[in-house]
Amino acid sequence: MNPSTPPVEVAVLGSGTSYGVPMIGCRCAVCTSSDPRDRRTRTSIWVRIANTHLLVDVSPELRLQCISNDIDAVDAVLFTHHHADHVAGIDDLRRFNWLMRGPIPCYGNQRTLDSLARMFSYAFKPAPDSPHSRPELQLFPIDSKPLTIGDATITPIPLMHGPLPILGFRFGRFAFCTDCNEIPDDSLRLLEDLAVLMLDAPLPRPHPAHFSLDEAVEMAHRIGAEHTYFTHITHHLGHEATEENLPERMSLAYDGLRFVAE
């Protein structure tokens, strides 16, 4: 590690796919599992770099995730894309407005920000006859150029989620690449020399917009991080049984997992 680069502390707030695990009305072995690692809220992470605290995506369970993981500071939010399981917790950012004493800057590609402004119009175009509390958010479009937020230098990683261009993010020697089934060659070059990679792997079978587990393992070998955690996991992958068959230096993420990349 470059001595001038601070370590990257990561808390996995949620590791589940869009339905979460357990799924409503499902009685499969994973949905009824007693292993707490099989209880998966929707995918989101919290990152701390020196004195800067960042959320990547805001899941529908954001309030509960923050309470469970003792998260009490968010200086900015990075959005991978606009799908509901990654943005539906946006109203819970109201509490961080109070804790941080100001609006929360939010970063994403232009399509994501346009979708947020439409989906949560009450936050961006408040109605005079509805003077209720709402999140105070500032939207900042980003592309593939690195950006600096406080103590954090962040490199956006262009990814493909089926036909939808989205973003992953690199923080020092850690990278987060959820909801993808293609990593372009130019983006692969941005993922060299990683200590920790988090990579999309919901299912044991192919999917038109996500890596299968086998595809994710192959991509993880290609990227060559010191350790890879798979995330956005469905009820088709039980934690213990899946872990037994993963290669060395690869694991399933789980809600509440914490690690430091340096």
Image (spheres, grey):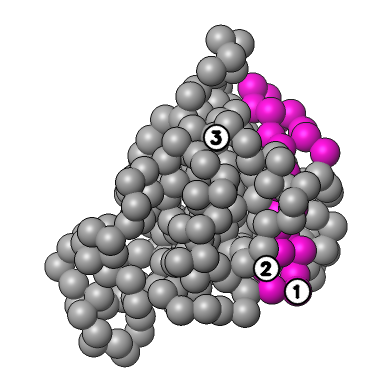
Looking at the image, residue 118 sits to the left or right of residue 29; the answer is right
Asked whether residue 10 appears in the rendered view, the answer is no
Q: Is residue 52 above or below residue 140?
A: above
- Chain-order first, disc 3 or disc 2: 2
Q: Amino acid at mark 1?
A: Pro
Give the residue pinned by disc 1: 163
Tell me where the magenta segment starts and ends, as one range: 145-167
Q: Is residue 168 above or below residue 239?
A: above
Looking at the image, residue 34 sits to the left or right of residue 122; the answer is left
The residue at the point 52 percent across, 78 percent down is: 206
Other residues around mark 1 within 10 Å, as few (<14) / some (14–19) / many (≥20):
few
Q: Amino acid at mark 3?
A: Leu
Q: SS at mark 1? A: loop
Other residues around mark 3 within 10 Å, as few (<14) / some (14–19) / many (≥20):
many
Decide which of 119, 31 is in the foreground and name it: 31
Residue at mark 3 to residue at mark 1: CA–CA distance = 27 Å
Residue 175 lies in what quarter of the image?
top right
Q: Amino acid at mark 2?
A: His
Question: What label sits on residue 101 in the rendered view?
Answer: none
Of circles 3 and 1, which is in front?
A: 3
Give the residue pinned by disc 2: 161
Q: Is 198 colored magenta in this rendering?
A: no
Q: Position of residue 72 (x, y in %)?
A: 45, 37
Q: SS at mark 2? A: strand
Looking at the image, residue 126 sits to the left or right of residue 24; the answer is right
Tag 1–tag 2 contact (CB < 8 Å): no
The residue at the point 67 percent across, 68 percent down is: 161
Tag 3–tag 2 contact (CB < 8 Å): no
Asked whether residue 237 appears in the rendered view, the answer is yes
Give the residue pinned by disc 3: 194
Q: Position of residue 260 (x, y in %)?
A: 42, 30
Q: Position of residue 261 (x, y in %)?
A: 46, 30
